[in-house]
Image (cartoon, rainbow, N blue to C red):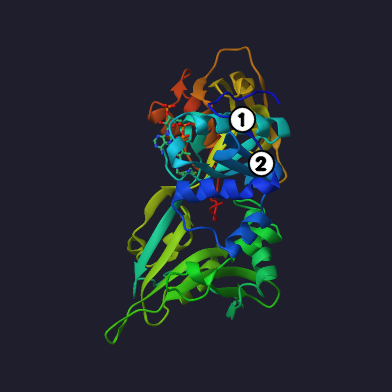
Amino acid sequence: MTQSASGPYPVRPIDENEIDGFISVDEHAFNTSPWSADDRRVALDRFEFDRTLAAFDDTTPVGVTMCYSFQLSVPGLQMLPAAGVTFVAVMPTYRRQGVLSSLMRRQLADVRDRGEPLAILWASEAVIYGRYGYGRASWHLDFTLRRGEGGLAGAPAGDGLRLRIAEPEAALPELAKVYDAVLASRPGMFGRNDAWWRSAIFDPAEQRHGASPLRCLLAEDASAPRGYALYAGVDTWTGFLPENVLTVRELMAADPAASAALCTDLLSRDLTTEFRLPHRPVDDPLLYQLADPRRTRPKLNDNLWVRIVDLPRALAGRRYSCPVDVVLEVRDEILPANAGRWRLSTTTAAPGGGLAASCVPASSPADLALDVTELGAAYLGGTRLGALTGSGLVAELRPGATRQLSAALTWDPAPWCPMVF
Ligand SMILES: CC(C)(COP(=O)(O)OP(=O)(O)OC[C@H]1O[C@@H](n2cnc3c(N)ncnc32)[C@H](O)[C@@H]1OP(=O)(O)O)[C@@H](O)C(=O)NCCC(=O)NCCS
């Protein structure tokens, strides 16, 4: 252990026989109904007991968290180990006594000890995690369209594509092929094993809130699946007027024609007056293929938060869009090994696209001064470093350094994490 976390209650991983107390903290903190047997099965399927942490008041857990061991796609077709922080909860009667802070500090020390360069999470509230060095690294858009607004203009032809409705479970091999193809090009996604796929299509009747079972629409040609949508509809009538609502849980397309084919079908479904597509990437092809994109009524939200845990490994582990050579003065109060001056300079063109870089300690004057939070925000190439300098969160010490680093960090396609974990 590199660091012991000081806090009001002792922190340690839980044993398997302490799982009920762990879940109870989560249920109380999130105001959920008691977990059903199915909820437990699907959650425990992916559980990593050795990566749990709980703060104990005597023998009772009063604050909890856990990490998943992910492989995360980062710019340049790279996959890096990343700790997926989850189940963050403190018993309501123990809030604001520093329980979360003690858990976060211990967890980050553990992640560093395991050699993972990154930690990632989804934030229930945007005010919680900046203080621990997590930055808003990707963004998503929620779309809502109404009947007649889903017409596409200028979408590429389907070249042999056909659509097929399938049972989600039976279609898992096809879904995984499409997902892996997208994962190979888009930063911000984590690799899914069988347990994650079971979770992706988990659809207990008591959580449908009146909707149909989860359905699957596949786009495929003679040789391979190229896209899929997992969706459900609510069958609603006002008198004799059909007013169904269709919600897409996940839409993944390996190419623009597959995206267009899926959206054309889904956004024109009969009887339906409202189409909801939450959590879409900010560069979703739909925004450019629709005849009237304003009709998506886009709502912007933060998506994945990134914490740089091992700075030189993280920065050398991704690729860069153009040449860069800068010295960074980095602040990191929680993981001091990251603090100090680092020289980031691109080296050679990398096989997967972009430029490789080295990141080594530096003694020359810094070009930019920033907190590790801002470096995490810019890391996946979705939050522009220039915007962070423009907001006063990054200090430019050499004129032009922001523009150079911002251009090098920015990445196409935009980072996106399709699944809350
Ligand atoms: C969010 C939560 C985990 C915080 O736990 P906690 O033990 O009360 O947090 P701490 O006492 O360690 O607080 C640390 C700091 O964060 C601040 N903070 C924590 N939660 C906050 C919140 N929801 N809103 C605003 N500030 C918050 C505290 O005020 C404190 O600030 P300070 O350091 O300036 O004094 C807890 O309130 C909770 O379980 N909430 C519901 C479940 C949830 O949202 N979990 C997060 C899932 S991503």
In the image, residue 142 lies at what x, y percent?
Answer: 41, 57
Q: Which mark is residue 14?
A: 2
The yes-or-no answer for disc 2 within 8 Å of ligand 1 is no
**Residue 416 against residue 400 in the figure, above or below:** below
Q: Is residue 77 visible?
A: no
Is 92 situated left or right of 315 in this image? left
Which residue is nearer to you in this view: 120 or 408?
120
Q: Amino acid at mark 1?
A: Arg
Query: Which label belongs to residue 237?
Result: none
Amino acid type, residue under disc 2 in the picture: Ile
Residue 253 position (above or below residue 94) = below
Q: What percent of the width, then of the height, locates residue 248?
A: 48, 67
Q: Which residue is drawn at the image coordinates 55% and 55% (left, top)?
A: 419
Along the line of sight, the residue nearer the viewer: 362 or 347? 362
- In the rendered image, the residue lying farthest to the front is 58
The quadrant of the picture showing ligand 1 is top left
Residue that carries the numbered disc 1 in the rendered image: 106
What SS does tag 1 mark?
A: helix
Q: From where the camera sits, is residue 142 visible? A: yes
Q: Earlier in the sequence, mark 2 or mark 1?
A: 2
The N terminus lies in quadrant: top right
Q: Position of residue 68 (x, y in %)?
A: 65, 46
Q: Please provide percent x and percent y for residue 274.
A: 36, 71
Residue at 45% in and 21% down:
396
Mark 2 to mark 1 CA distance (whole Å): 14 Å
Count of marks placed on residues: 2
How dense is the environment of label 2, judged by Cα within 10 Å: few (below 14), some, or many (20 and up)?
many
Q: Which residue, as the protein is rendered here, is positioned at the far left?
A: 239
- Helix, strand or loop for disc 2: loop
- Classify residue 417 as left or right of residue 170: left
Q: Are marks 2 and 1 in contact (CB under 8 Å)?
A: no
Residue at (59% x, 33% y) in the render: 58
